[in-house]
Structures are given as C-alpha cells and as structure tokens.
C-alpha cells in the first residue's frame, strides 16, 4: 500500500496563515512558529518550558519515543515569547486554531497542525541540508522516516532531470 506524501506548508502560506491569527492569540502564534520554524510536534510544543529555551537553541525533552534532542531557536523568535511558556492551550484548542486559520487563509483543507512540521522538513531538504542533519533535527530514529521528504516534491525531481538532459 502506497503511503500518502506529507502535506507541507510552504513559506508564503505560513505568512498568510499567521496573518489570520487574532492579534491577542500569542500562544497559537508561538505554537505555529515552533512547529514551522523548529520542527516541533504539537505535544513537544505543549511540553516546552522556559528552561528549554537558550540563546540559540531549544532543548526538546522526552520527545516522541522519550528521546531528547536539540533544535534551532527560530530566527523570528522574540524575547517576550519565552515568558508565555508553557503554553496553556490544549492540543485540541491549538488544532482548532490551526484549522480556523487554514480556512480563513483558503489554504489546502487537508493541512493539519503537523503540516507545519512537514513544512520545516521540506524546507530543509529543498535547501540542501544533508538528510542525516534533517533526521537529527526531526528526532527520527530511522533515516527511512526522514526519507519520505525527499519524495514529497516530485516536481523537484522532474526539474533536476530536465537540468541534466
């Protein structure tokens, strides 16, 4: 059985998505940012505390499979954001916020909160980051899990072919 390719949010779509959040909704903005620009899973976003944030990176404690890892602090991170951690919204509430913004932005209705993480991974692959580095940032035990992102952009494969022949 063929697995579905991940639905990855593109950079221009992320900007539109963020613009659809209410100004007061700082928790959702931070959650979206951490998923899209640091590759965190929604449960990892929820578990994040002030102590996990340093000047340049985020320490993810007990991620999926109980594994710890280090990911970059998003370049768009602002000092006030640390004070909002831990996020008090429930996972379900964050998922609803995301779905509402996707609808308002008229983006792909198949996008889920996890599409933010997929967008992070896809951007890394498209930028030429080595697959082993992407694997480490995502916290995947098996490289084949990370490898799905190399198949997520069939148009890139066609473009590479056309450049050769």
Image (tube, rainbow, N blue to C red):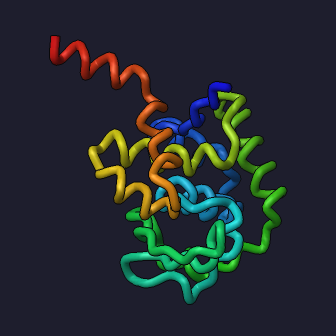
Q: Residue furthest bottom?
A: 51
Query: Which of the 4 image quarters holds residue 132?
Result: bottom left
Q: Residue furthest left?
A: 164
> Measuring 70% from the left and 65% from the top, which residue is drawn there?
43
Query: Which of the 4 image quarters holds residue 63?
Result: bottom right
**Up-down relation of residue 121 to residue 51 (above or below):** above
Q: Position of residue 68 (x, y in %)?
A: 54, 77
**Up-down relation of residue 128 to residue 137 (above or below):** above
Q: Nearer the viewer, residue 42 or 3?
A: 3
Q: Position of residue 39 (x, y in %)?
A: 52, 58
Q: Quadrant of the C terminus?
A: top left
Query: Which of the 4 image quarters holds residue 86?
Result: bottom right
Q: Position of residue 64 (x, y in %)?
A: 65, 66
Q: Quadrant of the N terminus?
A: top right
Taking the image as shown, residue 101 lies to the left or right of residue 133, namely right
Q: Position of residue 134 (x, y in %)?
A: 40, 55
> Measuring 29% from the left and 51% from the top, which residue is drawn there?
130
> Measuring 77% from the left and 51% from the top, which residue is drawn there?
95
**Up-down relation of residue 79 to residue 147 (above or below):** below
Q: Nearer the viewer, residue 98 or 143?
A: 143
- How many marks are shown on the rendered structure? 0
> Measuring 63% from the left and 31% from the top, which residue is drawn there?
3
Q: Nearer the viewer, residue 81 or 71?
A: 71
């Amino acid at each position: 059985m063929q697995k579905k390719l991940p639905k990855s949010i593109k950079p221009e779509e992320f900007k539109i998505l963020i613009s659809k959040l209410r100004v007061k909704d700082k928790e959702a903005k931070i959650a979206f940012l951490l998923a899209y620009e640091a590759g965190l899973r929604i449960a990892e976003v929820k578990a994040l505390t002030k102590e996990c944030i340093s000047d340049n990176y985020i320490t993810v404690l007990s991620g999926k499979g109980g594994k710890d890892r280090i990911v970059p602090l998003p370049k768009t991170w602002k000092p006030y954001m640390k004070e909002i951690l831990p996020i008090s919204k429930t996972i379900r509430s964050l998922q609803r916020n995301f779905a509402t913004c996707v609808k308002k932005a008229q983006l792909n209705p198949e996008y889920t909160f996890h599409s933010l993480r997929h967008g992070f991974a896809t951007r890394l692959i498209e930028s030429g980051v080595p697959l082993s580095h992407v694997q480490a940032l995502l916290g995947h035990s098996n490289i084949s899990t990370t490898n799905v992102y190399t198949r997520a952009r069939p148009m890139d494969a066609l473009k590479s072919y056309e450049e050769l022949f």
